[in-house]
Image (cartoon, rainbow, N blue to C red):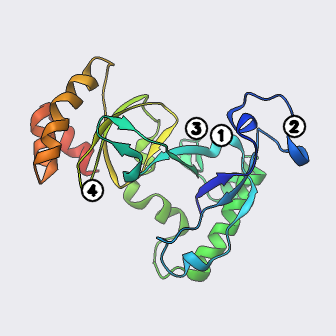
Amino acid sequence: MFFVDYELSPLLRSGRSDHGGVLGADRNAPLVESRVNAQDKRPWNSVRPLRGQIERRFLKQVLLGQSIAPYRVLDPLTAVIPWDTQESRLLDSQGALELGYPHLAKWLGQSERLWARHSTSEMSFLESLDYYGKLSSQFPLQALRVVYAKAGVKAAAAIVRSSRVVIDHKLYWMPVDSEAEPPEFVQKVGPILQELDPLRPIFCAVIDRPDCILVLVG
């Protein structure tokens, strides 16, 4: 319900076009449709995709395990992330409506109803989105981070240089303070990640940061 595809032209999507687009598309609230793929579990793989406008500020790039290769970031996915910067919290449908985000409120309302109808979890929809705080703990998003994959045939570490990217729970991540730190870090850690398992103790030992275990486990 949260990974989406844009339903407008690439120019409008990137903000480089001043035209309204086909059928009056709004670049400040693009039309999107939720993604359904073969890896989704029942009943979610049979739920009809959501389709509607979303205020652009709530559309974020998300890195999954498949989004990184050794030393490089591949194409991210797009997701609806209802984080409000001013309130510093994730919004539910009622909160979005009260703060004046009608498109997000409608999307969240539909998602909450689907969750109530189909989920067997005791968690609320918002709790499931912020599973153990792994989403909200990323905000405010850091402009410079190092990520590495939890699983894969070959381990991979890469540098993320964007404060608009959210990191999925399938990746470990940690912030770094300067542009000088990550390249040296990745050069050291990358070859080791190719060879050694388990990864996490080696990852922490190489960079010699006392806070890294807390960051990575979280």
Q: The residue tagged with tag 3: helix, strand or loop? A: loop
Crowd around label 1: few <14 · some 14–19 · many ≥20 (10 Å): some
Of the two numbered discs 3 and 1 on the same chain, state the one appearing first in sequence. Answer: 1
What x and y, as percent, mark residue 74? Answer: 43, 41
Q: From mark 1 to mark 2, how far is it between C-alphas?
A: 18 Å
Q: Which mark is residue 152?
A: 4
Of the two numbered discs 3 and 2 on the same chain, state the one appearing first in sequence. Answer: 2
Crowd around label 3: few <14 · some 14–19 · many ≥20 (10 Å): few
What amino acid type should be assigned to the residue bearing mark 3? Thr
Residue on which disc 3 sits: 85
Of the two numbered discs 4 and 1 on the same chain, state the one appearing first in sequence. Answer: 1
Image quarter for residue 10? Answer: top right
Q: Nearer the viewer, residue 14 or 84?
A: 14
Q: From mark 3 to mark 2, how far is it between C-alphas?
A: 27 Å
Q: The residue tagged with tag 4: helix, strand or loop? A: loop
Residue 209 visible in the current orientation: no
Marks 4 and 1 in Cβ contact (< 8 Å): no
Of labels 4 and 1, the one closer to you: 4
Q: The residue tagged with tag 2: helix, strand or loop? A: loop
Q: The residue tagged with tag 1: helix, strand or loop? A: helix
Q: Is residue 159 left or right of residue 185?
A: right
What amino acid type should be assigned to the residue bearing mark 4? Gly
At horizontal 48% and vertical 64% (from top left) the residue drawn is 127
Image height of 52 relative to 207, above or below: below
Marks 3 and 2 in Cβ contact (< 8 Å): no
Of the two numbered discs 1 and 2 on the same chain, state the one appearing first in sequence. Answer: 2
What amino acid type should be assigned to the residue bearing mark 2? Gly
What x and y, as percent, mark residue 24? Answer: 89, 44
